[in-house]
Image: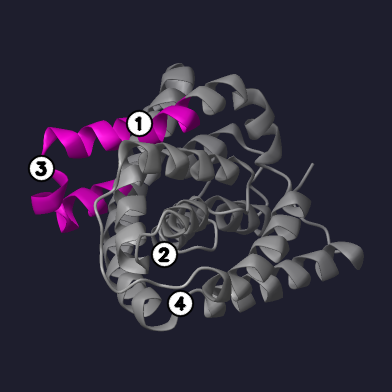
Amino acid sequence: MSIWQAIILAIVEGITEFLPVSSTGHMIIASSFMGISHLEFTKMFTVNIQFGAILSVVVLYWKRFFQSVDFYIKLIIAVIPALVLGFLLNDFIDSLLENVIVVAITLLIGGIILIFIDRLVKDTVSERELSYFDALKIGLFQCIAMIPGVSRSASSIIGGMLQGLSRKQAAEFSFFLAVPTMAAAGGYKLLKTYDTIQAADIKMLLFGNLIAFIVAMLAIKFFISFLTKYGFKVFGYYRIILGLVLLGLLASGYKLDIV
């Protein structure tokens, strides 16, 4: 992986991690077009730079993130389903991380859902207290995003709205939930591959995390404002267009770096 390829992937991660468009799916697409999706370091890099993205949440929301014990209990409850399923299905999930076809299909299906979700689930004006059971159900929704292209952000935000949370409240809880979820995923991946990391790789990883951190901070500020005003429809259309373009390229015989 070259430095420019690392920069591109880090920017993609920072922009898409908290948008309902699937950061994993976009990084699979980007790495496939660059011909590096099959590399083991690419797989580790795309997971590891999530540390930079989640650090942006802690920095932007530090006053709210470091709050009551009750808040942390809810985060722990919400992250448990992903930890259990992620551990049990780790090899299967890894097998999907090179497959652009899976990403294209899930982008398309997810886009259709996002177009209609604002009609099916109305945004509430008032905010209410999140219960422990609500947190668990949001955590279960988040597990759907283990399929590349689904979007952790979209699934957890929709899960929150189905529990009666406002768009803003659901989005912010999704951001908070991303911290333990992605920290656990990145830490587990790092633990499995740390013995293969070279000195040059460390510099690349640190650089990628820095870029992802800066870009993610900007993306979060944009997303909260946009989602509150306009909802999910624009993201739905974007996903559908991207999914159809990918399927069209694959059907025409365009060679991507996939298995």
Q: Residue furthest bottom?
A: 229
Tally of marks? 4
Q: Residue 110's spot in the image, x, y percent?
A: 65, 62
Mark pair 2, 1: CA separation? 27 Å
Q: Amino acid at mark 1?
A: Ile
Q: Is residue 51 visible?
A: yes
**Residue at point 39%, 45% (across, down):** 50
Q: Is residue 198 magenta?
A: no
Q: Is residue 52 visible?
A: no
- Nearer to us: label 3 or label 2: 3
CB within 8 Å, label 4 to label 1: no
Q: Earlier in the sequence, mark 3 or mark 4?
A: 3
Mark pair 3, 1: CA separation? 16 Å
CB within 8 Å, label 3 to label 1: no
| Camera-side residue of 102 and 12 | 102
Q: Which residue is mark 2?
A: 15
Mark pair 4, 1: CA separation? 27 Å
Q: Earlier in the sequence, mark 4 or mark 1?
A: 1
Q: Earlier in the sequence, mark 2 or mark 1?
A: 2
Q: Which residue is mark 4?
A: 231
Q: Which residue is mark 3?
A: 67
Q: Which residue is mark 1?
A: 77
